[in-house]
Amino acid sequence: MEAVVEPYLGAVYTRAWVVELMLDLAGYAAPRNLVDARAVEPSVGQGAFLLPMVARLLTSCRVQRRPWLDCRDSLRAYDVDATALKQCRRHVQQLLIEAGVCGPDAEALLNAWLVETDYLLLVGRTTGHTSQLPGLFDEPVAAGVDFVLGNPPYVRVESIPEAQNARYRHLFPTMRGRADLYVGFFEAALRQLRPNGVCAFICADRWMLNQYGESLRRYITTDFAVELLLEMHDAAAFEDTVSAYPAISLIRRASQGAAVVARATNELEQTPAAEIVACLNAIRLEATPPGVLGLTAARVPEWFPAGRPWTRTTPTRTALLAYLEQHFEPLVSAATGTRVGIGIATGADAVFFTTTPDLVEPAQQLRLARPADVRTGQLVWGGQWLLSPWHRGKLIDLAHYPRLHAHLAAHRPQLAGRHVAKKNPQAWCRTIDKVDEPLYRRPKLYIPDIKNTLFPVLDQGETYPDHNLYFITSDHWDLEVLGGLLLSDLGTFFVECYGVRMRGGYLRMQAQYLRKIRVPAPAAILPPQADALRQAFRTRDVAAATVAAVAVYGIGHLWPTA
């Protein structure tokens, strides 16, 4: 970030090559009439962005043979850190002197451009109204600006005083949950844009993926267009080493069209900004791009809808994911009656799981499936039983089940000490989750929770899953056909995009990821395609499943490059 929002907050400064690239990407360049444009730097700090912006503005003014004072309303730079602002003022003053701006004109420009104020409070009180406050452009803020450029503050919610945080959140509704302060800066910047105006920020990219960024993503996809996301995780973007995962975002007040997603490495610093911009523009326009060392990029024809995560792996895989999300529905759908869940959590597996047959009444002893039972790709029951204190969603009266009562009573101190039992001491014998008895006899696919690939296994209604197995049931899917889709490399592709690989290369198959997997409508799969998927699933042939799945999704032109 270029500045702090309160004196207790630190600042991280952007390296010059990144700033120059961002200005070029946004179109803030001297060939344009920058004098009559309106540009904002919302957290100026010592001027990492402002100084090159001023240099470009002065060049534009000179080319047009305009008086220097015509630039009075071309820029606004805000900060609450008076010390940083004074340092920035000295740097800008020196730049003006070197450009030949006389003392009085330089003083007038400095007084107009540099404003000590809280940008969020300023924008929050004025956007959508015609009222003015000191430091705003001569016309009302509602008229809009052409550029908002910079690096907003990285300030976690815990570091903002409670009253101040409440005020920000009242003014900027996208700041929800554990939203970092930069979320408010995004909303404020976007509010200021006039039609075709652009916001170019470099910022931590977690909001593009996580829950607290959902409202901001929804806000952007409703009224703005994402033009570029350039991941900078592996590039030296800042003067100091920081733990943030930054990305450059280019967002315009316009209708959404094709976007470009890209990834930079350290080698990119050696490439002139003009060549990088030319490459990214060529990709967006589907022209042949020049090769650029340290840059990979891909065109995304249709952006992620609503507030869904802007998931990114490699640029080409991101483009494929965006395409699939636009053209196919999530796995969990009311139309197909598909359900994804996880097996039972007991809070005391040693009590509720047993290998002893007939330990309790037969109706309360269910065959239990565990990850070891599906490791071959076929369900081979390992002899574990689940002892159930439930019947039709209610706890049983243990007095009617003497064997189960005796077993559980022998462990009552342990069971009563669990959190779930302390909340309701009368239900000391319960498992954390209820036993869903209809699930026991229902055909389902099992998915082990930790695996290096998505690994569906069919249960014909013979077992009940433990808490290390996810299950999928459906009213309309042939589970072997669905199993073939999930077994394919495309099934694993979705989980890789939505989640992350852990140490050792393993994936966590969480329900939230499985529910978001995109699938075609069952009726849209042609009989030969269904036969191919079914056969691949039965023989555990991932390659054959992938060939069939690619044909079903109709992505043969995209999949080889993904």
Image (cartoon, helix red, strand yellow):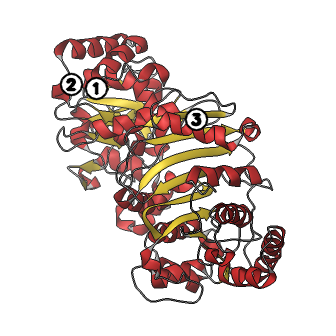
Provide the secondary structure element on which disc 2 rests.
loop
The image's mark for residue 348 is none
Give the residue drawn at x 35%, y 42%.
515
Q: Which amino acid type corresponds to the residue marked 3 in the rendered image?
A: Cys
Give the residue drawn at x 35%, y 66%.
426
Mark toward the viewer: 2 or 3: 3
The image's mark for residue 279 is 3
**Among the two numbered marks 1 and 3 on one chain, the one whose residue lies closer to the N terminus:** 3
Indicate the position of residue 33 as horizontal and vertical percent values. 56, 62
Horizontal side of 435 relative to 173 (left or right) equals left
Give the residue drawn at x 68%, y 64%.
62
Q: Nearer the viewer, residue 551 or 558?
A: 558
In the rendered view, tell whether residue 151 sits above or below residue 137.
Answer: above
Provide the secondary structure element on which disc 3 rests.
helix
Residue 448 can be seen in this image: no
In the rendered view, tell whether residue 67 sits above or below residue 399.
Answer: below
The image's mark for residue 478 is 2
